[in-house]
Amino acid sequence: MPLADMILANVDLLSVLRRFDISLGVGDKSIADVCNEKKINLEFFLAIVNIFHNKEYFPTEKLQGFSISTIVHFLKKSHYYYNQEMIPSIEVLIHQLHWKGDDHERNLHILQKFFNEYRTEVKTHTDHEEETVYPYMVYVEETCMKSEHIEECYRKMKHYSITNYAEEHNNIEEKLTDLKNIIIKYLPPSHNQDIAFRILQKLFKLENDLKHHAAIEERILVPKILEMEKVLEQIYLGTKKS
């Protein structure tokens, strides 16, 4: 299938292409040709694209066959998209909303307050994953693959297991729901409703994207690491007994 046809079939996939560093101007090149040129794993690319294209599709078994580092690389690109592109673009639109008289400052302050709280929560969450969780996952995978430094890895597991992450993995959907409800239900209508509609469209798009993101972490990464932790613990305790 030509990559251009895929984009024409679902323009929302453009944000996914950016995370694979794929630019426009692809001509009639097929998806396979572009992936080959960019040194992208074709099967991984197709799995991710289809998750974002079809909300009913989630190839658990296929995704579990890819390395932790491959998946993490994509998720970190998603973090950049959320924090540096999507959320700032929503803030720009928020500041374009306009109400009459004194209501303008009051309403804008309320909306900006909730938006800033949400932005901070997303940034805190993604920073924690990049600084602590993802490096731990990659380290556990490398230890399993190489069968080296098992005792050191076991000590790290005792200090921080992936079960900690599963418990800490806060749901950041609640504040996003609050933000949507403020615009839909509680604030009086602004004079430029077209801007309000655009903000909501972006919020819903961000929400859907984050759901895919969380599903990959919870249904693929966490089970894979839990299994690796069990294997490494068995190996370590086996060496101690012998």
Image (cartoon, rainbow, N blue to C red):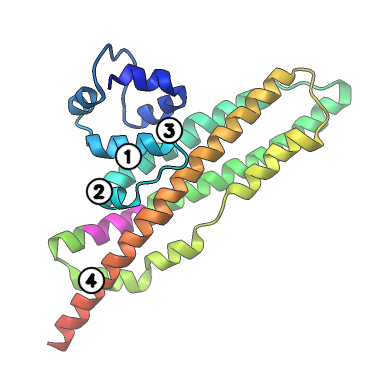
The local secondary structure at tag 2 comes to: loop
The local secondary structure at tag 4 comes to: helix
Q: Nearer the viewer, mark 4 or mark 3?
A: 3
Q: CA distance from mark 1 to mark 3?
A: 10 Å
Q: Are marks 2 and 1 in contact (CB under 8 Å)?
A: yes
The local secondary structure at tag 3 comes to: helix
**Residue occupied by mark 1:** 47
Residue 121, visible in the rendered structure: yes
The first of marks 4 and 3 along the sequence is 3
Q: Are marks 4 and 1 in contact (CB under 8 Å)?
A: no
Density class for disc 2 (Cα within 10 Å; few <14, some 14-19, many ≥20) is some
- The image shows residue 3 at horizontal and vertical percentages of 30, 21
Density class for disc 3 (Cα within 10 Å; few <14, some 14-19, many ≥20) is some
Amino acid found under the numbered disc labelled 3? His
**Which residues make up the magenta segment?**
134-141
Residue that appears at 29% across and 66% down: 227
- In the image, residue 208 sits, relative to residue 166, either above or below, namely above
Q: CA distance from mark 4 to mark 1?
A: 29 Å
**Residue occupied by mark 4:** 232
Residue that appears at 68% across and 20% down: 195
The first of marks 2 and 4 along the sequence is 2
**Residue occupied by mark 2:** 66
Q: Nearer the viewer, mark 3 or mark 2?
A: 3
Left or right: where does residue 215 sit relative to residue 240? Answer: right
Amino acid found under the numbered disc labelled 1? Ala
The first of marks 2 and 1 along the sequence is 1
Q: Are marks 3 and 2 in contact (CB under 8 Å)?
A: no
Q: Main secondary structure of the magenta part?
A: helix
Left or right: where does residue 14 sit relative to residue 157? Answer: right
Q: CA distance from mark 4 to mark 3?
A: 37 Å
Q: Are marks 2 and 4 in contact (CB under 8 Å)?
A: no
